[in-house]
């Protein structure tokens, strides 16, 4: 015969177990990061902006934390392969993901993801935001965005290229077009290289891409910048107006970069890593290197980062659903 403990005994046992778990978590947080190197998983291949952000952060964090910080590129499937690896990693503060704005789109665009973006990962820190810029070839008749918009009011419309179906550039122009009765016809490319090649050759009338991708072609005068998608002008393209300035009040669709951890990572570790990232972002050389990539640093708390990312997930899910957008095959 099994004897059941009285309710007050069960309550005491529960309190004791909770206290033990808390002590274990505190001990783990206090020991961090002395047990192993810290891994920053860049969820895109070498050479892109995510890789650049991770490699700019790593040495600053290593110096501050007194622990080796390594960058591990796990690219593929719009960043989901690397993100899935981090979601499945032990929540011990030694594995973090450096993600791009595709993280805010993948949940609605790729429904068979092996992780839940809101439940299986937790935001550590925003790194920063940057403008996307709409460009046209230097010989184009479109001198301003107003010229392109006027052409897009014609039933034939105007074609524009992006780095792929479901990319933030694609979604931003889709949202703009639907809200303003403009006929912009999407031409998806498989990445920034092919897009830029066709843009500078004039094979596609307009191209939407990050400042990181487009600025070299703008600087070389092969492309003309028409407008940026952020609510404020880009510091490294100060002469290029925003869509809000161009008659589309309130429009804001930034590219963004952030650091995530596996869910259930101890809050004390998340808080400490957030503080260290913020400290790194305040270093003039780190901020300058990010600015050269078109990224304005964003200092804030894990809660603020989580709220921003979940807001992006919800916003772009509506755009994907309303426009029946599918990922490239």
Image (spheres, helix red, strand yellow):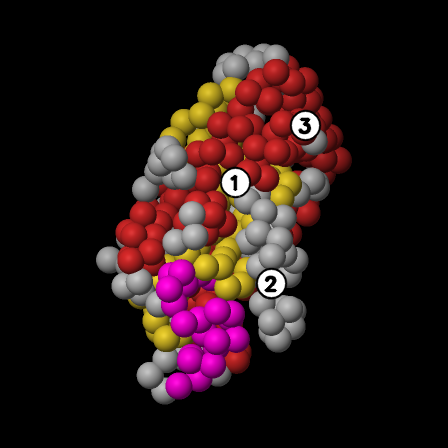
Residue at image location 64% in from the left, 41% down from the top? 297
Q: Residues within 10 Å of mark 3 (few under 14, many from 20)?
A: few
Q: Position of residue 51 (x, y in %)?
A: 44, 34
Give the mark nearest the N terminus, 1 or 2: 2
Q: Quadrant of the N terminus?
A: top right
Q: Which residue is the site of mark 1? A: 293
Residue at image location 64% in from the left, 61% down from the top? 231
Foreground label between 2 and 3: 2
* Residue 88: quadrant of the picture: top left
In the image, the segment drawn in magenta is 134-154
Judged from the image, the secondary structure of the residue bearing numbered disc 2 is loop
Q: Position of residue 252 (x, y in %)?
A: 60, 62
**Number of numbered discs on residues:** 3
Q: Which mark is drawn over residue 103?
A: none
Task: Name the foreground residue: 77 vs 303.
Answer: 77
Foreground label between 1 and 2: 2
Q: Is residue 9 visible?
A: no
Q: Which residue is the site of mark 3? A: 283
Task: Name the foreground residue: 138 vs 31.
Answer: 138
Residue at image location 35% in from the left, 36% down from the top? 45
């Amino acid at each position: 015969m099994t004897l059941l403990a009285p309710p007050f005994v069960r309550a005491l046992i529960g309190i004791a177990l909770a206290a033990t778990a808390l002590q274990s978590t505190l001990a783990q947080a206090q020991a961090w990061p002395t047990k192993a190197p810290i891994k920053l998983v860049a969820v895109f291949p070498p050479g892109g902006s995510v890789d650049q952000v991770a490699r700019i952060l790593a040495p600053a964090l290593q110096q501050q934390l007194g622990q080796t910080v390594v960058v591990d590129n796990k690219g593929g499937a719009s960043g989901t392969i690397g993100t899935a690896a981090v979601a499945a990693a032990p929540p011990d503060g030694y594995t973090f993901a450096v993600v791009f704005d595709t993280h805010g789109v993948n949940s609605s665009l790729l429904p068979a993801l092996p992780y839940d973006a809101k439940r299986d990962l937790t935001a550590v820190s925003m790194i920063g935001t940057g403008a996307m810029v709409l460009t046209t070839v230097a010989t184009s008749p479109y001198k301003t965005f107003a010229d392109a918009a006027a052409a897009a009011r014609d039933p034939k419309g105007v074609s524009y290229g992006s780095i792929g179906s479901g990319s933030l550039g694609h979604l931003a122009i889709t949202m703009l077009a639907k809200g303003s009765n403009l006929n912009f016809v999407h031409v998806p490319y498989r990445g920034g290289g092919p897009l830029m090649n066709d843009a500078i050759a004039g094979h596609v009338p307009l191209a939407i891409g990050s400042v990181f991708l487009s600025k070299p072609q703008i600087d070389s005068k092969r492309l003309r910048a028409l407008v940026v998608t952020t609510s404020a002008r880009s510091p490294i393209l100060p002469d290029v107006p925003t869509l809000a300035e161009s008659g589309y009040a309130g429009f804001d669709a930034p590219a963004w970069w952030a650091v995530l951890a596996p869910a259930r990572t101890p809050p004390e570790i998340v808080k400490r890593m957030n503080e260290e990232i913020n400290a790194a972002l305040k270093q003039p050389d780190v901020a300058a290197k990010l600015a050269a990539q078109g990224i304005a640093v964003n200092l804030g708390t894990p809660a603020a980062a989580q709220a921003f990312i979940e807001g992006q997930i919800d916003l772009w899910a509506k755009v994907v659903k309303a426009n029946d957008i599918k990922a490239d095959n």
